[in-house]
Image: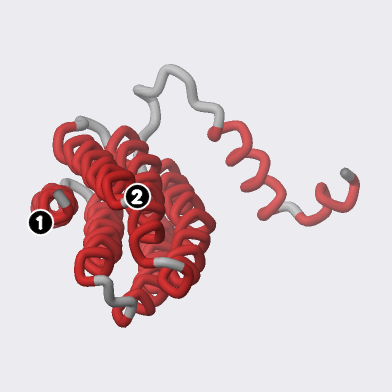
Amino acid sequence: MIVAAICFFGIAGLCGTYRLLVGPSLADRVMALDLVLISLMGAIAVDSARRNDTTYLVLLVVIAIIGFTATAAASKFIEHEHDQSVEVAT
Amino acid sequence: MTTIANSLMLLGGFIAILAGVGVLRFSTSYARFHAAGKASPVAFLVAGVGAAIELGASGAAHLVIAGGAMVLTVPVGVHLLFRAVHRTSNNAHLVIDELAPAERVSKQLATDPHQRRQK
């Protein structure tokens, strides 16, 4: 049952990976990367419960903060790049 | 107790699959953000509650910190991406666009500092 839960998180991560590779825009890729990271976090939590081992739970906090930093920086980059291309065009 | 924890973790995995299918199948960027940004924190929270039941107090502390960080940051990140897409793409096809008037006001305030003082 627990292994099935890990597999479910893995399937969600694969869906996100597809969108990460195919995604039409840069924002889609960033969002897909966020989904992959969250699936990884869920899989780590469930795997810790399966092995009854709290060693890797520290990773969850780190991944959450890194994911937010990546998303915020990427969205600022998307806006900035668009502004510059508009200035060049006019 | 183990049955409850296992069911919660399985439910979390199921919600994660829903988020993944939404990201895979929806047609517009806004709809994909909606699916990924709302369902995936819920998936992690449900699975985390199950894992916390299984692990006891020391594991639950880490999971509470991680879940709290996630609930605080994921909606903010999705909102930032959403706004970036709204600013950089053509929104003429949207039926209801409640962000456009606010964006116009904020752009006006950014370019004209005198108007800000008068208001």
Amino acid at pointer 1: Leu
Q: Chain of mark 2?
A: B
On screen, residue A12 above or below A50: above
Q: Chain of mark 1?
A: A
Q: Quadrant of residue B95?
A: top left
The residue that disc 2 covers is B1
Amino acid at pointer 2: Met
- Residue extending furthest toward the top: B95
- Label 1: which secondary element: helix
> Percent x, y for residue A40?
23, 63
Q: For marks 1 and 2, give the one nearer the viewer.
A: 2
Foreground: B81 or A32?
A32
Q: Quadrant of residue B62?
A: bottom left
Could you give the CA–CA distance between mark 1 and mark 2, rounded to whole angstroms?
41 Å
What colouring method underlies this structural image? secondary structure
Q: Quadrant of residue B92?
A: top left
Residue for point 71% across, 49% down: B109
Q: Is residue B30 left or right of residue B57?
A: left
Foreground: B101 or A11?
A11
Q: Which mark is residue A21?
A: 1
- The local crowd at label 2, few if under 14, some if 14 to 19, many if 20 or more residues have their Cα within 10 Å, is few
Q: Which mark is residue A33?
A: none
- Residue extending furthest toward the bottom: A55
- Label 2: which secondary element: loop
> Percent x, y for residue B113?
78, 56
Foreground: B19 or B114?
B19
Residue for point 38% across, 73% down: A66
Residue for point 39% across, 45% down: B42
Residue for point 28% across, 58% down: A42
